[in-house]
Amino acid sequence: PPFSPKPTQPNPTDNRLHTPIHFPAHTIVPHNQPRRMVGRHTSSSPTSPAPPPPASPAASAPRRKKKRQKTAKTVDPSAHPASAEEHELAALVFGPPHPTPPGPALTTSPTTAASSPNNNNASDGPDDSPNNNNPDDSSPHPTPPASASAWIDDADQPDQPHQTAAALVSLPPTSRSRKLRESESEAALPAHEYERRLRRQYERMHPGATAWAAAAAHTNQPTAGPRTTASTTPSPLPPSRLEVTRLRDANAADPADAVLRSVEFHPSSPLLLTASLDRTLRLFRVDGASNPKLQGVHFEDMPISRAAFAGSTHVVCSGRRPFFYVYDMQAAAAERVGPVAGVTDRSLETFALSRDGRTMATLGSGGVVNLLNLRTRSLAGSLRMSGTARSLCFSADGERLMAAGGDGAVLTWDLRTRRVLGRAVDEGSSGATALAASPDGAHYATGGEAGVVNLYEDPYGPGGAAGPAPARSFMNLTTTVDTLAFSADGSVLACASRMKKDALRLVHVPTRTVFSNWPTSRSPLQFVHSCAFSPGGAYFAVGNARGRALLYRLHHYDAA
């Protein structure tokens, strides 16, 4: 007889099944039958085993339900990449978007508050500060003092009687190990002696690098966490040698497809902008490790020749066009400005911004310097110099404007009265091509077509009157100087030329000397078109013709 499955027994717990289900014989194919038997009526042999009954629909229903549960996913709308980047950029530039919700006030013990005046060791968990030495603490495991070591190896202690030969460190016959030897017969050293000689060798190679640790030891400060010193005044930058380490490129997340004409750090946030001839403005968060990209803006009708931060919320971008763009980072919107009434120039690619971001000075034809009010987007006034104007910069206080011409003359105006304060001639220069003023107002520098960089003492700065001769002339570059940049404290001056490969030098301003140890012949600078120092001085960015923003760490500075 044809195969007939057994009737399905109703499940007393399942209300959906009330009657047995019977299947026709010609529609049932046992799972152990070959594929060629599909659709044929066969008689079961007495010797062949009976096929197992098929699974009932009720039994397979829960399994299908499990599959649906496995494939179901929960989408969090707050994890959208674009939204997260916008929130991160807003938090970096403008601070937290919402105030702290009301709740119970946080209490801090007097000892912890006194030992951490800056309150930089915030934590979401329990207080694990090493300075929490409250004698009234009832914790069963009190926190040890900051000066106590967390772990001590008895084998490394020189005064322990059980120290044996197992604590010896061998000195192989290599050039690195020979520097630690005091005699050729030394083949091994005790662990503590090996550590002492390593420290001594490091101090020989890096003089002054551990001064912060000695200062922290005198003030009983913990050595963990950010470096702090006993005095708030930073130590002076040592001359002739600069400790530099290359980090991940600042724009490694999105390199440019053309020359990087501008790189600049935000005045108060860890942001870096890059602008190139590929018509794109990019913003990155600089941390020295990943340097993620936060925003990017593409301008269809303008290759960017210059970009700079205007205050803390806007970016100004210009090119060889009679107009420019103002990008609002908070609203993520770009506004096209121009042509401005009263400005007849066809190109606004060279400009300078005051430190407060209110005034924009552009170079015009015939030695004209236009002053634009960025708040009203209108022309505020014009200044004129003899000959042609080729470069300009604002003073540190924003009250003076300096401009250098093709005849080598440098003029200084008082922006409050629009009158010329003085005129100087750049010594030995047939035409000034670059101009920069130090943030401390003590110096300014000029660069010429022959590669000569002259460093002057600002006669209108805090140092008082100075002679017409430069304080020092640097002839390390042999091609036209087109990039000059001072560090935030005025101790370092960067000079670069895009006409020659690896043409970049750093000057120690207090001693008027050039750092000889960097850049080296293996520094991959390529053709340098722009450079900038971070506000704290710890980072130095270099934009080259390959569209890369090289990032370097200056170890003398602690703040970024």
Image (cartoon, rainbow, N blue to C red):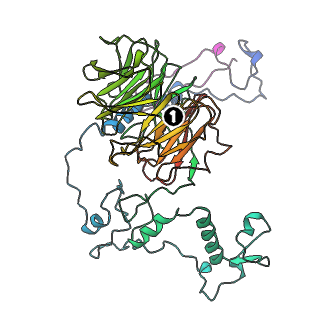
**Front-most of 304 and 195?**
304
Instruction: Give the farthest residue toward the bottom.
Output: 161
Q: Answer yes or no: is residue 494 visible.
A: yes
Q: Give the residue displayed 43% in from the left and 57% down from the top.
A: 226
Q: Which residue is mark 1?
A: 447
Q: Is residue 319 left or right of residue 176?
A: left
The image shows a total of numbered marks equal to: 1
Q: Is 179 situated above or below 454?
A: below
Residue range highlighted in magenta: 1-29
Q: Is 539 situated above or below 275?
A: below
Q: Give the residue displayed 32% in from the left and 47% down from the top.
A: 462
Mark 1, residues whose alpha carbon is within 10 Å: few (<14), some, or many (≥20)?
A: many
Q: Amino acid at mark 1?
A: Gly
**Front-most of 239 and 305?**
239
Name which quarter of the figure residue 105 lies in. Answer: bottom left
**Front-most of 9 and 127?**
127
Name which quarter of the figure residue 468 lies in. Answer: top left
